[in-house]
């Protein structure tokens, strides 16, 4: 009997060592893929890093991009960095544009898109030069990237707005590119584009997509000189332009703006009601709370209900929080309404809500309401508690010790989001889990919390 126990103990130790060595081999294998892997293997690795929200191989990817002309690899790296607005590839992207005759079109386009997403002021001259060539294959993305790239510097933004207005007015960019120039003008946030944007928005003979783009651009600029054109569009016959005008009111203030937003809740076109909720949300318009309550409870369009709930969460006065609380606790409401309300409550009054949310989570599991359970699990997993974190610590420990893979993954997020260093034992144990993703995430969490593995 004792021999059996000894043998079992050795087996457990050997298995533990095996899993540990396997987990430690993951990083060398990933480095090997970057150094020697095929474009398909590197694409798969980038997708894994994206899923894990991991940045620890960024330097290696920057080095890789400098040494390759492989279109799929370069495009993948530019997209991975661009989606996170992560700098480090500007020089490579600029070189790609300058040497575009030696690069694939897709590579050049991904480089242009990257420079816009990271708002690279250094890229503005090369982007303008690219537009001056009028190579139609690059124009759409280049206009948008130029607007973004110039937005971090006011002087540069004004220069870019002048350039774009001139391009729109005098160079006949073609219908395919006009909308992109309008979007770019909004991205600059320069007031020098407001006159042209207002003219386009208020022109009833202009195509609706261009008027809508101009309204959105006026909203992004947020200059008071554009307000009259936006208000004029609220009474237009085109419902899409009308809803875009209401959505554009968010950055503006004044009695006329408030009245326009509240009137928009009565519009029969659902997109206008959505726009009214979004404008109320961005302005935290307390006068809209009764309208939002009615929309959240009774509107026949689910998206309107969802936007109303989000607006209530952003306004977050006592009346709004009370409405959210009743929507969350009423078990007859749809899963979507309860989950959206729970998410808003956790952002506005997380410490007060967490206990009841855990109770509803357990109730959903008991009744095999899988979708509702997973939804509540996600809400808790993303929550950040201000103040007393003891309740969060307890549920996190429960997930890490006894949960399935998904609960453990969320538990690691909860530990990191709420700085739960007291769970070091549980996190260390998971760092050697046989599931590679779980073990890797546990190690990242430990590093983030300053826990030595």
Image (cartoon, rainbow, N blue to C red):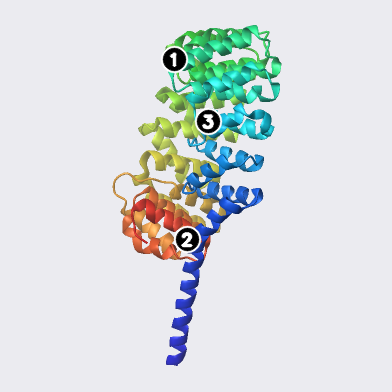
The quarter of the displayed image where residue 209 is located: top right
Mark 2: few/some/many CA within 10 Å (<14, 14-19, 20+): many
Could you tell me which quadrant the C terminus lies in? bottom left
Which tag, 3 or 2, sits closer to the chain's start? 3
Q: Residue placed at 44% from the left, 63% from the top?
A: 430
Question: Would you say the residues marked 2 and 1 are in contact, meaning their CB atoms lie under 8 Å apart?
Answer: no
Quick one: label 2 or label 1, which is nearer the N terminus?
A: 1
Q: Quadrant of the N terminus?
A: bottom left
Q: CA distance from mark 3 to mark 2?
A: 32 Å
Q: Circle 2 sits on which residue?
A: 439
For image coordinates 62% across by 21% down, the residue present is 130
Residue visible at 53% across and 18% down in the picture: 186
Give the structural element (helix, strand or loop) at label 2. Answer: helix
- Between residue 39 and residue 195, name the one nearer to us: 39
Answer above or below: position of 367 versus 287. Answer: below
Residue 26 left/right relative to 154: right
First-in-chain label (1 vs 3): 3
In the picture as drawn, the residue positioned furthest to the left comes out as: 388
> Residue 248's x, y, as percent?
52, 19
Return the residue at label 3.
Answer: 117
Residue 243, position as x, y percentages in the image = 58, 20
Q: CA distance from mark 1 to mark 3?
A: 19 Å
Would residue 332 be visible to someone looking at this image? yes
Q: Circle 1 is placed at which residue position?
A: 155
Vertical arrangement, residue 322 with respect to residue 184, above or below: below
Secondary structure at numbered mark 3: helix
Q: Characterize the local packing of mark 3: few (<14), some (14-19) or many (20 or more) Cα atoms within 10 angstroms.
A: many
Inter-mark Cα distance, 2 to 1: 49 Å
Horizontal relation, residue 393 to residue 133: left or right: left
Give the residue displayed 63% in from the left and 16% down from the top: 132
Q: Nearer the viewer, residue 416 or 269?
A: 416
Marks 3/2 in contact by CB < 8 Å: the verdict is: no
């Amino acid at each position: 009997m004792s021999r059996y126990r000894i043998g079992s103990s050795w087996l457990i130790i050997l298995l533990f060592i095996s899993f540990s060595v396997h987990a430690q081999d993951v990083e060398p294998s990933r480095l090997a893929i970057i150094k020697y892997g095929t474009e398909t293997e590197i694409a798969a690795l980038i997708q894994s890093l994206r899923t894990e929200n991991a940045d620890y191989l960024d330097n290696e990817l920057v080095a890789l991009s400098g040494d390759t002309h492989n279109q799929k690899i370069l495009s993948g790296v530019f997209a991975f960095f661009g989606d996170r607005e992560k700098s480090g590839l500007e020089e490579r992207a600029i070189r790609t544009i300058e040497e575009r005759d030696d690069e694939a079109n897709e590579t050049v386009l991904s480089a242009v898109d990257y420079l816009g997403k990271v708002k690279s002021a250094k890229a503005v001259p090369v982007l303008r030069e690219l537009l001056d060539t009028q190579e139609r294959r690059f124009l759409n993305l280049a206009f948008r990237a130029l607007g973004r790239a110039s937005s971090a510097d006011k002087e540069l933004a004004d220069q870019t707005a002048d350039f774009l207005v001139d391009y729109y007015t005098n160079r006949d960019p073609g219908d395919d590119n006009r909308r992109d120039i309008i979007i770019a003008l909004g991205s600059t946030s320069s007031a020098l584009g407001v006159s042209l944007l207002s003219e386009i928005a208020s022109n009833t003979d202009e195509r609706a997509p261009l008027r809508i783009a101009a309204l959105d651009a006026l909203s992004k600029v947020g200059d008071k000189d554009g307000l009259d054109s936006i208000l004029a569009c609220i009474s237009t016959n085109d419902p899409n332009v009308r809803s875009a005008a209401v959505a554009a009111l968010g950055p503006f203030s004044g009695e006329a703006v408030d009245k326009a937003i509240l009137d928009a809740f009565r519009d029969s076109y659902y997109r206008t009601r959505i726009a009214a909720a979004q404008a109320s949300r961005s302005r935290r318009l307390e006068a809209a709370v009764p309208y939002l309550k009615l929309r959240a409870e009774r509107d026949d369009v689910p998206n309107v209900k969802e936007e109303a709930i989000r607006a209530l969460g952003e306004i977050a006065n006592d009346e709004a929080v009370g409405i959210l609380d009743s929507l969350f606790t009423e078990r007859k409401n749809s899963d979507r309404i309860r989950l959206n309300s729970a998410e808003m409550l956790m952002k506005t009054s997380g410490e007060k809500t967490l206990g009841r949310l855990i109770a509803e989570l357990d109730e959903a599991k008991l009744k095999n309401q899988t979708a509702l359970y997973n939804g509540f699990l996600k809400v808790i997993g993303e929550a950040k508690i201000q103040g007393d974190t003891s309740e969060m610590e307890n549920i996190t420990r429960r997930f890490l010790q006894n949960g399935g893979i998904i609960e453990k993954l969320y538990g690691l997020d909860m530990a990191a989001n709420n700085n739960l260093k007291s769970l070091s034992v549980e996190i260390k144990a998971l760092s050697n889990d046989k599931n590679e993703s779980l073990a890797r995430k546990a190690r990242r969490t430990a590093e983030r919390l300053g826990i030595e593995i």
